[in-house]
Amino acid sequence: MRVLVTRPAEKALKTGALLERLGHQPVALPLFHTVHDPDGARQALKRQSWAALAATSTEALKGLDAERDAPALRDRPLFAVGAETAHAALVAGFTRIFTGTGNGEALAEAIAAERSLFSKTPLLYLAGSLRAPHLERRLAALGVPFETVAVYTMAPIDHAAADLSVAIQDADAILFYSQMTAMRFFALGAANILRESASAPLFLCLSENVAKAVPAAFAGAVRIAGAPNEESLLSLLP
């Protein structure tokens, strides 16, 4: 199958290699590129003795070394949204990592279950400047004290209509890993291109929240991963 990968370039390379091993033809169409702020991240980590940390993307931990940048926090709990982010935390040198199920609201529930941690100091959420609000909204509802610091930005990439058409043409499936990416894809005019295609591709979405960004006209072609991870997403491919 010809599979369109909408992830940032570095991650699209890894996904493309997986797709090739599965016998598919990957086509990269990155819609954002990541701009990191490692100095901002280090300053936030050192500002106070946070009770715990949270991260919902590997990008939040890029370039960090716990021993160098946050030795006092190295052994504090770090709540990671899923296995990929948890691995990034381990590589960064954090030792006490909670691995979530890939859902921001579920991660908030897990954090709230450790409420005694936050009796004196808040949680630090290392985040992107553009992000889904699910974790923060649920933490606030549960009364968990936290502070969000944006340590990276997802900068949008523009694609000319002709280039977008070439990328989409003959696609059998399109992979969406985030709601923001799916929204960006259709904001660029992809729906008009797809309507002119002989048949609509499958829209493979990491979660129900991601699927909400796909226009209702294509609802019949939407497939949602059974679990919010890449293995489950790619298993949707015929």
Image: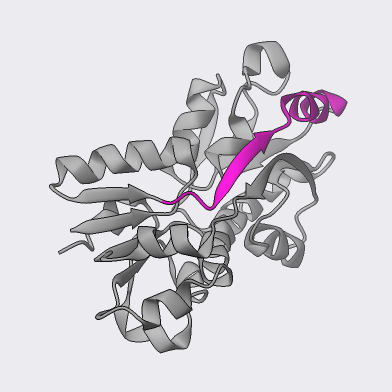
Q: Relative to 204, is 148 above or below?
A: above
Q: Quadrant of the N terminus?
A: bottom left
Query: Is 214 left, or right, of 16 in this rendering?
Result: right
Q: Relative to 134, is 50 above or below?
A: above
Q: Relative to 80, is 183 above or below?
A: below
Q: Where residue 112 appears, x then y in whole percent? A: 65, 54
The residue lying furthest to the front in this view is 162
Q: Quadrant of the C terminus?
A: bottom left
Q: Where residue 225 appears, x then y in whole percent? A: 33, 64
Q: Where residue 56 appears, x then y in whole percent? A: 58, 47
Indicate yes or no whether the magenta region holds residue 26: no
Q: Where residue 128 appears, x then y in whole percent? A: 68, 46
At x 43% / y 66%, what residue is drawn?
207
Query: Is 34 left, or right, of 100 in this rendering?
Result: right
Query: Is 15 left, or right, of 71 in this rendering?
Result: left
At x 46% / y 79%, what residue is drawn?
192
Q: Which residues are magenta?
A: 29-47
Work out whether residue 35 or residue 140 is closer to the camera in this orientation and state it.
35
- Quarter of the rendering containing residue 226: bottom left
- Quarter of the rendering containing residue 59: top right
Callout count: 0
